[in-house]
Amino acid sequence: MSAERDVAALSAAEAQAELARLAAEIVAHDRAYYEQDAPVVSDADYDALRRRNAAIEARFPDLVRPDSPSHRVGAPAAGGFAKRRHLAPMLSLDNVFEPAEFTRFCSSVRRFLGLDEAAPLAFVGEPKIDGLSISLTYEHGRFIAGATRGDGLEGEDVTANLRTLAAVPQRLHGHAPALIEIRGEVFMAKADFLALNATQAAAGEKIFANPRNAAAGSLRQLDPSVTAARPLSLFAYAMGETSESVAATHGAFLDRLRGWGFAVNPLSRPLAGEAEAAAFQQEMAGRRAGLDYDIDGVVYKIDDLALQRRLGFAGRAPRWATAWKFPAEQAESVVEAIRIQVGRTGALTPVAILAPVNVGGVLVRHATLHNEDEIARKDVRVGDTVILQRAGDVIPQIVAVVADKRPAGTVPFAFPDHCPVCGSLALRPPGEVVRRCTGGLTCPAQAVERLIHFVSRAAFDIEGLGEKTIAEFHADGLIRGPADIFRLPQREAEIAAREGWGEVSARNLSLAIAARRRIPLARLLYALGIRRVGEATARLLARHYGSFSAWRAAMLAARVIGSEAREELGSISGIGPAIAEELAEVFAEPRNLATLDELAGLLDIEDAPAAAGTALAGKTVVFTGQLRSMTRQEAKARAEALGAKVTDSVSRKTDLVVLGEEAGSKARRAAELGVLTITEAEWQALAGA
């Protein structure tokens, strides 16, 4: 056998055949070990195969195969991770925490689809792994790239590290689409986590707080060999972009994943309705502690993929799935102080400073108290013993005060009526629960918080500009406004001379800033930190106006109450008068306009992508009357998915009005303006519904 021959004696043809045999044999052993838990060779024999493969490749570097086992341990990366854009958005899930909320989720699905409240819904329930979400791209069955979730639109390119995971098939078994994105969760089993921490402690290295942090830290290593040495696992559970249909139901898709060579959570189960889902939730809660991996709830997905496509997405979450989280873990601690934080919109938020306590595997030192009404309702005082929980296992909050442990002499907390940072009056507008500083741009706290928001993950996402750095740069005059961030590379030498920096760190910051000068319009709008303009609203505005210049011109015109531009802004489906007023107020302030124009001169702002190849791309559509084939909500979602702008009123800028039954004033207005109208049947044909 050629495997027994000395590598030095192999011809090129023999080496090529040997490398093909070794690649297939090692993949088979990986599958037996990781997927079937049934290894067929000893560790020593397995290591010998890999060593032989490496030796042949060293002698014949031109014969290294794309699917070579050696790619599972790559060379150290030269710098930080590059960004990789997902072909289809990799969005997050909405959460529910109790049966009534799950029932409301089911009702919302039925309403969107126009189903009777008693209509059955079939689900697939999947334990929600507490790990790191990743996306794997395959072309013609071959793994070509992998990325973390990131902001849902782009993540960190960790392809080299993912190649080191035996749980990631380098080639899909059997027929596969020409292109498909597979989504999954990288995690670390509890036993592996404990063993890793023991090894880290013995070596005097950092130990991890929990298995999720260990998994994330292990995958995000600049040296892939470190990742290769860590015991990481993967469960696959979803797909992103695909060039062809692969299944009719989610359950069938999970079967395809297994056939392609992925591990799928064996506890995933088809469920006939809400009652079975509720029973499955109780079962998983009972089994949670005994599992070899951490779960923090169960994900419930509508099984029918055709219904999933109809339901689509709302903001950053699918309408066809939800995560039913387990009850939050609780603990007791003592309130050592109550401090007021001033946010980017001037909101005064009380925060409890606590005696450190472990809650659900995380050391908690702070907890939000929300607002002055919440403090008064719970009567939280300095010195109180309180019950904490991490809401959704993420945000620490105070549930209640332990009254019988209250020390004598405590007094109710007096909420300030002036900003603790700049001293400006803090007012509470009628009907609102939040008190706000009136200092505006003159308030240092607001300025710093706005800058922190500006560079945050969902905005400009500039690596190296964290909260501490922003605060220090602002205090020392390096940054006063957002535009100053993009002038920092001109002060690289000055930054390098700062304590804790150096030439390499300063250069990396300059490179990170340069990499973010090009930004999509939606991210810029979110980064501006306009009140009530979150990520979903920013995407809505970007899609409607298309370009920065068009948005700027429209907002300037919208300052005038009653103007056509103001009416158009307020009629955008999902905007409304409150957001329109906030935007108009921003553009009424000359300093804000100057900041925008300054940024526009420093940045390359990408226009919002339009849906190409559809008759509705870029068109402004209005629905009126009673639709019979689908709900109004579904019709609007379908139009937006095809690149249309949906508004709630008819104007000269309207391109198309869809007339349902009993269409009224909007139909008459369309006729007066000469706007094209079509019937519901014609709409169905146009939209492919």
Image (cartoon, rainbow, N blue to C red):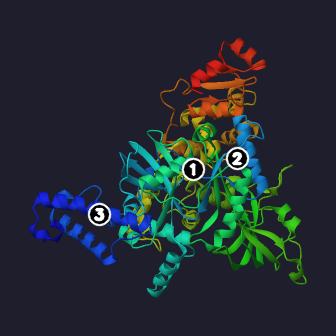
Earlier sequence position, callout 3 versus callout 1 = 3
Neighbor class of circle 1 (other Cα within 10 Å; few <14, some 14-19, many 20+) is: some
Which dot, 1 or 2, sits closer to the camera?
Answer: 1
Image location (x, y in percent) of residue 255: 50, 51
Q: Secondary structure at mark 1?
A: loop
* Image quadrant in which the C terminus is located: top right
**In the picture provided, is 56 more to the left or to the right than 424?**
left
Q: Which mark is residue 91?
A: 1
User: Label 3 amino acid?
Assistant: Glu
Q: CA distance from mark 2 to mark 3?
A: 57 Å
**In the picture provided, is 322 more to the left or to the right than 7?**
right
User: Contact, CB < 8 Å: mark 3 with mark 1?
Assistant: no
Q: Which mark is residue 532?
A: 2
Is residue 545 something that shows in the picture? yes
Q: CA distance from mark 1 to mark 2?
A: 21 Å
Image location (x, y in percent) of residue 457: 55, 56
Q: Residue at x 75, y 19 (%)?
A: 661
Earlier sequence position, callout 1 versus callout 2 = 1
Q: Residue at x 76, y 50 (%)?
A: 103
Q: Which mark is residue 25?
A: 3
